[in-house]
Amino acid sequence: DDRAEAAAPPAFQEGDAVEAKFQNGTRWYPARVTAVRAPKTRGRDFTFDLLYDDGEPEERVRPDMMRADASRPAQPPRPKRAAKPAAPAPKRPKPAAAAPRRRV
């Protein structure tokens, strides 16, 4: 897609330690970049999904609401989780052995 290629490279990468203004607020909070989203239209910036250190996620954060956190090292991106395999079917109990038949 040449739209994404024409855009400047993203300011942050997945795993980067950042500080961000949660929901366009005024205070900076520590977070990690969990995803980089390419712009869908020409002239727009990349946006970023974040996971704040308190566990709160936020999606599509603009780079002007973020700054690098030099006090913390970047972490390599976590591998994508594979879908969990279906749980094995519960084992059925074996039927009790029948008592031997007596001949009459």
Image (spheres, helix red, strand yellow):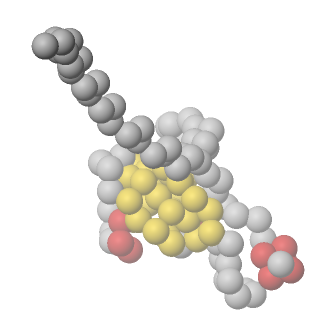
Q: Which of the image's four quarters has the C terminus? A: top left
Q: Residue at the spot x=28%, y=24% of the render?
A: 94
Q: Residue at the spot x=30%, y=32% of the render?
A: 92
> Residue 42 at x, y = what percent?
75, 87
> Does residue 29 show up?
no
Q: Nearer the viewer, residue 12 or 81?
A: 81
Q: Residue at the spot x=50%, y=44% of the render?
A: 85
Q: Residue at the spot x=25%, y=26% of the render?
A: 95
User: Which residue is at the far left?
Assistant: 104
Q: Is residue 52 above or below residue 40?
A: above
> Residue 100 at x, y = what percent?
20, 12
Q: Nearer the viewer, residue 71 or 51?
A: 51
Q: Is residue 41 above or below residue 14?
A: below
Q: Is residue 66 left or right of residue 97?
A: right
> Residue 57 at x, y = what percent?
38, 59
User: Which residue is at the far front?
Assistant: 104
> Does residue 102 show up?
yes
Q: Is residue 88 left or right of residue 92?
A: right
> Residue 88 at x, y = what percent?
41, 38
Count of marks overlaid on the render: 0
Q: Is residue 83 above or below residue 60?
A: above
Q: Is residue 31 left or right of residue 104?
A: right
Q: Which of the image's four quarters has the N terminus? A: bottom right
